[in-house]
């Protein structure tokens, strides 16, 4: 019984060794084929002596655990398994050769090689997708810029209204030397940053909003010998201030209002 048990263990070891070595041999042959498919100088066709040499190289690593007879048996089984897996073909000089199946070789290709070959075979689709994606991104960016420009123009427009309204109230106060109008270019240079001044569309959008506002008059005026365009608040009362109290202005709006009041005071002082 003990000897039968020992023989069974040896048989199981031989089977496992055969399976592992067969898988390694097939893997190496398919790797060579995959490198050839990727243009990396691999080998596709293998003759009998090539496969036998590869099997000897693999089995030499386990020689210490197998007898000579065991190595011979395992090698025969490995070669039989490899022959059953590989495809048989002929070389240009009618010599029998073996190769990894095309499907298995393609699966052994590296991901980078697969991606490169997929792009090459679908170049029209890839180019079309890239062009459409670039066009879509450009459209989305243009929409975002227009919305950002409109939002910033509305913020500046509100500040201009606050400045003109506060300036008009100060001009009507008794013993005040403040003029009821404000030069347009002064407001532009004060409210716009240096970078924003380069964007001519921003102030143009602000001017469009000012022209649509019936509470504001815009007319030419000669100041110190130079022709200027001035803005003047014509509405009575402080309607915008009441609306802001009802709506609850945000922190930025409140800080903008304080800046507007200070600028109005500076204009009156000057």
Image: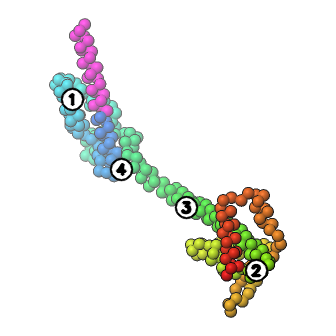
Looking at the image, do the residues carrying marks 4 and 2 touch, with CB atoms under 8 Å apart?
no
Q: Which-is-in-front pick, marks 3 and 1?
A: 3
Extreme-left residue of the structure: 68
Residue carrying label 3:
134
User: Is 131 situated above or below 260?
Assistant: above
Q: Which residues are magenta?
A: 1-23
Q: Which-is-in-front pick, marks 3 and 4?
A: 3
Q: Quick check: 124 left or right of 67? A: right
Instruction: Name the N-terminal-most of marks 3 and 1.
Output: 1
Residue carrying label 2:
176
Looking at the image, do the residues carrying marks 3 and 4 touch, with CB atoms under 8 Å apart?
no
Q: CA distance from mark 1 to mark 2?
A: 106 Å
Q: Which-is-in-front pick, marks 4 and 2?
A: 2
Residue 229 placement (x, y as % from top left): 71, 83
Q: Is residue 143 visible?
A: no
Question: Does the segment drawn in magenta span residue 21?
Answer: yes
User: Is 208 situated above or below 57?
Assistant: below
Residue 195 placement (x, y as % from top left): 56, 72
Q: Provide the major secondary structure of the magenta segment.
A: helix
Residue carrying label 1:
62
Q: CA distance from mark 4 to mark 2?
A: 86 Å
Q: Quick check: 30 left or right of 115? A: left
Q: Residue at x 68, y 58 (%)?
A: 250
Assign a secondary structure to mark 1.
helix
Question: Does the segment drawn in magenta span residue 16?
Answer: yes
In this view of the protein, which residue sits in the foreground, 149 or 161? 161
Extreme-right residue of the structure: 236
Q: CA distance from mark 2 to mark 3?
A: 59 Å
């Amino acid at each position: 019984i003990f000897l039968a048990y020992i023989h069974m263990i040896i048989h199981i070891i031989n089977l496992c060794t055969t399976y592992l070595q067969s898988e390694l041999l097939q893997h190496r042959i398919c790797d060579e084929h995959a490198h050839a498919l990727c243009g990396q100088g691999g080998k596709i066709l293998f003759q009998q002596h090539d496969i036998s040499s590869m099997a000897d190289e693999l089995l030499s690593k386990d020689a210490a655990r197998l007898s000579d007879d065991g190595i011979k048996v395992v090698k025969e089984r490995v070669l039989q398994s490899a022959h059953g897996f590989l495809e048989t073909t002929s070389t240009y000089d009618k010599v029998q050769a073996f190769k990894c199946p095309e499907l298995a070789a393609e699966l052994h290709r590296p991901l980078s090689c697969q991606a490169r070959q997929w792009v090459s075979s679908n170049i029209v689709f890839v180019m079309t997708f890239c062009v459409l994606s670039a066009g879509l991104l450009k459209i989305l960016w243009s929409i975002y810029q227009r919305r950002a420009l409109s939002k910033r123009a509305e913020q500046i427009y509100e500040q201009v209204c606050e400045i003109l309204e506060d300036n008009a109230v100060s001009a009507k106060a008794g013993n005040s030397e403040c003029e009821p109008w404000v030069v347009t270019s002064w407001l532009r240079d004060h409210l716009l940053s240096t970078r924003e001044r380069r964007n001519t569309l921003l102030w143009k959008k602000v001017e469009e909003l000012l022209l649509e506002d019936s509470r504001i008059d815009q007319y030419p005026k000669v100041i110190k010998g130079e022709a200027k365009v001035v803005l003047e608040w014509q509405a009575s009362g402080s309607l915008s201030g009441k609306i802001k109290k009802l709506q609850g202005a945000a922190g930025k709006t409140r800080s903008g209002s304080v800046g507007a009041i200070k600028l109005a005071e500076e204009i009156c002082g000057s």
